[in-house]
Image (spheres, grey):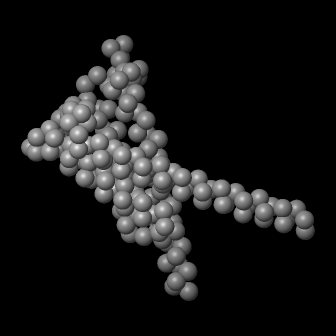
């Protein structure tokens, strides 16, 4: 019997650690979205994202609002996604938290698509060597996309679990 109790203790401890890690990931994403979103209201950031926005067929329509206007629109979206994700710190299965995770997934799919449309992503030596500026800046979004997918999966799984529990 003792080994079973020990296994249960380890499982509960592991589950608690996993939950804490999930909350930490969510908090990190909230922090990133809120801080990056706030930066989009500055001229510096508007100039920094202009080449990405302008060269992408997914985002070039934002140029109709001017450089700063495009940046503000992106910033508002990032702030909204950050606030929606923040709801998940307390209610991860809520529609708001799930919408934030969907927004996060869309954000990082979009930014990763910039690797195909933005000049100078690859080193002059050619692919698959990423440039030290643009390419390496964008490739980190693979990890942020993975975290976004994880938060979405966790929210949907919890939502399904709660729905099943209430239907009994």
Instruction: Please name the residue shown 43% across and 35% down the image.
Output: 140
Instruction: Kindly give the residue lying farthest to the right in the view shown.
Output: 1
Where residue 65 sits in the image (x, y, percent)?
10, 45
Task: Report the number of numbered marks.
Answer: 0
Where residue 95 sits in the image (x, y, percent)?
38, 69
Quick check: can you spot residue 8? yes
Instruction: Please name the residue shown 20% across and 49% down the image.
Output: 73
Instruction: Kindly give the residue lying farthest to the top in the view shown.
Output: 125
Quarter of the N terminus within the rendering: bottom right
Dividing the picture into quarters, in which one does residue 87 lie?
bottom left
Residue 9 is left or right of residue 130, and the answer is right
Where residue 3 sits in the image (x, y, percent)?
88, 62
Residue 21 is left or right of residue 51, and the answer is right
Where residue 98 sits in the image (x, y, percent)?
40, 63
Position of residue 126 relative to residue 163, above or below, is above
| Camera-side residue of 38 and 99 | 38
Instruction: Kindly give the residue lying farthest to the left in the view shown.
Output: 64
| Camera-side residue of 97 and 37 | 37
Position of residue 13 relative to residue 25, above or below, is below
Instruction: Please name the residue shown 56% across and 86% down the image.
Output: 168
Residue 127 is left or right of residue 77, and the answer is right
Quick check: can you spot residue 98? no
Dividing the picture into quarters, in which one does residue 10 lie?
bottom right
């Amino acid at each position: 019997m003792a080994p079973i109790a020990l296994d249960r203790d380890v499982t509960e401890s592991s589950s608690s650690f996993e939950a804490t890690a999930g909350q930490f990931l969510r908090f990190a994403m909230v922090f990133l979205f809120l801080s990056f979103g706030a930066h989009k209201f500055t001229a510096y950031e508007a100039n920094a994202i202009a080449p990405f926005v302008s060269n992408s067929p997914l985002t070039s329509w934002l140029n109709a609002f001017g450089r700063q206007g495009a940046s503000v629109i992106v910033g508002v979206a990032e702030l909204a996604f950050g606030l929606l994700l923040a709801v998940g710190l307390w209610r991860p299965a809520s529609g708001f938290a799930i919408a934030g995770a969907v927004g996060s997934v869309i954000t990082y799919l979009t930014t990763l698509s910039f690797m195909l449309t933005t000049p100078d992503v690859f080193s002059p030596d050619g692919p698959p060597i990423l440039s030290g500026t643009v390419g390496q800046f964008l490739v980190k979004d693979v990890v942020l996309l993975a975290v976004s997918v994880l938060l979405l999966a966790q929210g949907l799984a919890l939502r399904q679990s709660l729905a099943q529990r209430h239907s009994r």
